[in-house]
Image (cartoon, rainbow, N blue to C red):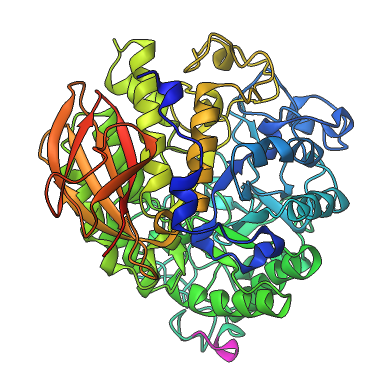
Amino acid sequence: MPRSRRIRALAAGALALAAPVSAADFRARLPQDEVIYFLLPDRFDNADVSNDRGGLTGDRLTTGFDPTDKGFYHGGDLKGVVRRLDYIAALGATAVWVAPVFGNKAVQGPQGHESAGYHGYWITDFEHVDPHFGTDADFKTMVDAAHARSMKVYMDIVINHTADVIHYRECAASPCPYHSRADYPYQRRGGVGGPPINPGFAGDDDRSAANFAKLTDPTYAYTPYLPPGDTHAKHPAWLNDITLYHNRGDSTFTGESSTEGDFAGLDDLMTQNPRVVAGMIAVYGGWIDRFGVDGFRIDTARHVEPSFWQAFVPAILARAKARGIPNFHIFGEVHLADPAVLAAHTRVDRLPAVLDFAFEQAVVETVAGTRGTDVWEHWIAADPLYAGDPATLPTFTGDHDDGRFAAAVRKARPDIRDAEILARVELADAMLLTLRGVPMIYAGDEQGFAGRGGDQDARQDQFGSRVARYNDAPLVGTTATTATPRFDTGHPLFREIAELARLRVATPALRRGDQRLRFASDKPGLLAVSRVDPATGDEVLLVFNTSTVAVDRLVQVGAGTTATMLAGSGCAPTVAAPGSLRVTLLPLGFAVCAIGPRP
């Protein structure tokens, strides 16, 4: 059966399970009710060329603007996001996550290796929109326009670090290795043999304001300083106080350096200091107060020590509730695929949710790669480890850091044909939109963007690119390239995602249902999972075939005698016997079927 016929309209079958959450009050929706669309404003759409250089004059090393270089600003802006909100809504997304919009250091990096802050993670002004993206008023217009369409807006925020502004005199021309607290204690200058400094400071385990008031000399590990012209580079003004940073050199991302070291040279905030805690609550609470945003994605969350989150999260949730936002969604980036480690950050740090990197790894290993479907058994079994509802964890198949799923397929299978790439991407999308979690679509995935890797190679322009490396990379499901604007609602991946997103929104079992593993194997092939609505007991059976050989077998189901196809193809219309349903799946095929009626 052609894939274009494998997604069925949301008629009687889906609507019989339950009506979707009312769009009249979008803030009544729980986080797990959303479908998230993630975009980088600079790479999404350019509706105002007057802000391409951010109000700066000079060459690209001053303005940061060079649309031919993947590491510089390309011109996308918030007005472009507004212009495409109807496109995003047509895809079935109910929430928009925007990469950081704050004022960034336009360009940084060693001579000959400079790049720009187009991505938004090199913040100098935490209180205002970067002029490359527009103005604070433009951001308000975007949020209000999204809300008018019953869509939520999630901000990408950074606590761990600021832009690289602080320098160290000892290593001005090279990276600074991490200097530990044992070798370079706070009460000695330049190491244990140095002269005494900071008398009475009891170390950063004592988080009291009185204790941190005694930390006045930052020269324990290095001699940090602000270059001329940068003494007031950051906003709000308290961020220009060097004593509010760890100043211990570059992180190795292990041990204490994971939370105390500079992330690739970026200035690492001393988040143990109560001044930093209060300051960041005020900064990000202000964005809630002024604009009424609906959630935060927290960058580099695992590199901030837990006590900060234990204070920050309840304060932000209270701020949001006071603003009339009862279901404010907070999820942290913990860039590890071990679900036990991910879950620990919901228990120790008390983060409400984390990005589900374990899901990403499972889909890459089983659909792009050659692992057996029992990988999913381990993913499902880990859900009880999370402190909160694992249904609130955003799931994804690829992103702006790791790269896109289609690139993972091509890497694992360099000789693969175009039709099989499309089939594997469609299968991954079906898993994303029906298994547990809040599905996140990375902008461009619905247009078949693939790229050649992660980071800059996965941040293609959607409004028409001038980057040769982007335009030379074949797309999936089309002969078009990124050289022209890619907002095609007829693209096969756009159509598939749109239909499955609407099915998910219309089906409580897919949004909030428990997961019950029905079948998995140590080889590629069948994965069968039931989603069961805890409120009604309604069951939806999900079956996926990760192999290139057809599947025909019996699968366990709950009470019920019939199976109604909701998407895909392959469920028999009636059970073979009580508790057993035959499924027949095409190679790389999938099916979503409602089991009923219940006795």
Q: Quadrant of residue 106?
A: top right
Which residue is located at x 18 percent, y 24 percent?
550
Residue 570 appears in the picture as rendered: yes
Spot occupied by residue 250 in the image (x, y as percentages of width and height): 46, 51
| Secondary structure mainly formed by the magenta segment | helix
Is 583 positioned to the left or the right of 416 in the image?
A: left
Q: Quadrant of residue 443?
A: top right
Q: Quadrant of the C terminus?
A: bottom left
Is 524 positioned to the left or the right of 487 in the image?
A: left
Which residue is located at x 59 percent, y 60 percent?
296
Residue 108 appears in the picture as rendered: no
Spot occupied by residue 316 in the image (x, y as percentages of width and height): 62, 74
Residue placed most toward the observer, 237 or 348: 348
Question: Magenta stretch?
Answer: 207-211
Q: Quadrant of the N terminus?
A: top left
Q: Quadrant of residue 534?
A: bottom left
Which residue is located at x 22 percent, y 60 percent?
559
Spot occupied by residue 542 in the image (x, y as percentages of width and height): 30, 45
| Membership of 141 in magenta stretch | no
Spot occupied by residue 142 in the image (x, y as percentages of width and height): 79, 49
| Membership of 208 in magenta stretch | yes
